[in-house]
Image (cartoon, grey):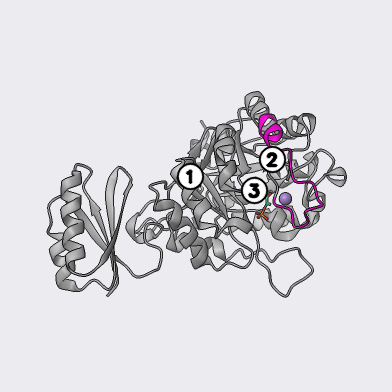
Amino acid sequence: MADLVVIMEPKGKTEVIDRLVELAESFGYRTASVRLWRQAVVVVVGNVAPEHQQQLAGQPYVARTVQVSTPYKLASRHIKGQTTVVRAGSLAVGGDRLAVIAGPCAVENQRQTLATAEAVRAAGATGLRGGAFKPRTSPYCFQGLKEEGLRVLAAARKQTGLAVVTEVLAIEDLPLVIRYADVLQIGARNMQNYRLLEEAGASGKPLLLKRGPSATLDELLLAAEYVLRTGNEQVILCERGIRTFESHTRFTLALASVPWLHERTHLPVIVDPSHGTGERSLVAPMAAAAVAAGADGLMVEVHPHPDAALCDGNQSLDFDQFRQMMHLCRGVAAAVGRSIADDAGDQTQGERDGSSAGTVQRHQDAQGRPALLTVRKPQNASAAVQ
Ligand code: PEP
Ligand code: MN
């Protein structure tokens, strides 16, 4: 026995949902209702007995009921077959094309941020990252430019068209950050700040949720569940490395979390090889490994002069290194049936010359989970060329 998720038909009216909730509660269960996918979804909490499930499933306007035994319900693959695509302006995370969110760790000034935004866009990035509110381990380190930094990000968006991903540190900053951000980043340190998750979720903005360095994947999914509970399913999960006994890298980048999460959740998963390694030379190889593991995107720190960066210079790539990383990742992406926007702008190399069409297919199983990748040779290679 397990908790039960009841998914109502879109035309199910409030009174119908209220009656179903009353019935479930009369059986002694707690309930939580939310509107997702333009449908009402009712989570019935408790070990729902088969006869109760049958009665609930037989109520008017019930589309289907699903038993979910994992602690997270709305984030579970079981209740939604396809991967969720999170969209914000230039950014789409969860489709065949990989999202690459790149930019400085912190917005330092307009010149630095605009130059970086131009360079990463030209290299194929689809989103701009940059912290205006920085969670620093030491209170004596640069804390970010705050609203001025947000204004710089907005100027960079205007100039490049890139969607802005930026961190919100506290509930009281939300109204300000929402005005400028396309995607709200909830940093690793705040992954379990549940009130912040609820408020950020209720804003309706897409969220990028970074894994806490000591959080399990179940805890990450439960943090996402707090957001989904607000009716906002625009959540990107981000693996950014965990703390282990290993001290050679800043964190240990746990890449197995990518396929693990894909098996269990419909939410897209991206990887941050910058914080995940803490070391510039390791960023490109681990970005490539993340793409090979099936990541839906990357978040990478880039700076015009990494050695002069006010924050995380050690792990930041310069423009050339970022271009090289993108080149490497493009090759890996093609090998696993994905693509990355070309440095020329919108089209991938494969889309332009047809070379990727039909060579590799990404399979999904019946539940829509990514399954094993197989490579298919085009039957007539020249026929693929438009
Ligand atoms: C960041 O992305 O700027 C950041 C602070 O990362 P994390 O929250 O993963 O430490
Ligand atoms: Mn950083």
Q: Which residue is mark 2?
A: 132
Say which residue appears at 16% left-offset and 49% top-offset: 16
Residue at horizontal 69 percent and vertical 59 percent from the top: 276
Q: Is residue 96 left or right of residue 313?
A: left
Where residue 67 sits, quadrant-wise, is: bottom left
**Mark 1 highlights which residue?**
95
Q: Amino acid at mark 1?
A: Gly
Report the residue that reaches farthest toward the top.
Answer: 159
Residue 219 placement (x, y as % from top left): 51, 65
The residues tagged by marks 1 and 2 sit, at their Cα atoms, a distance apart of 28 Å
Q: Nearer the viewer, mark 1 or mark 2?
A: 2
The residue labelled by disc 3 is: 299
Q: Is mark 3 within 8 Å of ligand 1?
A: yes
Mark found first going from the N terminus, 3 or 2: 2
Which range is magenta?
135-151
Q: Is mark 1 within 8 Å of ligand 1?
A: no
Q: Name the outermost residue toward the right.
A: 307
Q: Which residue is pictured at 53% across the width and 34% down the height?
A: 385
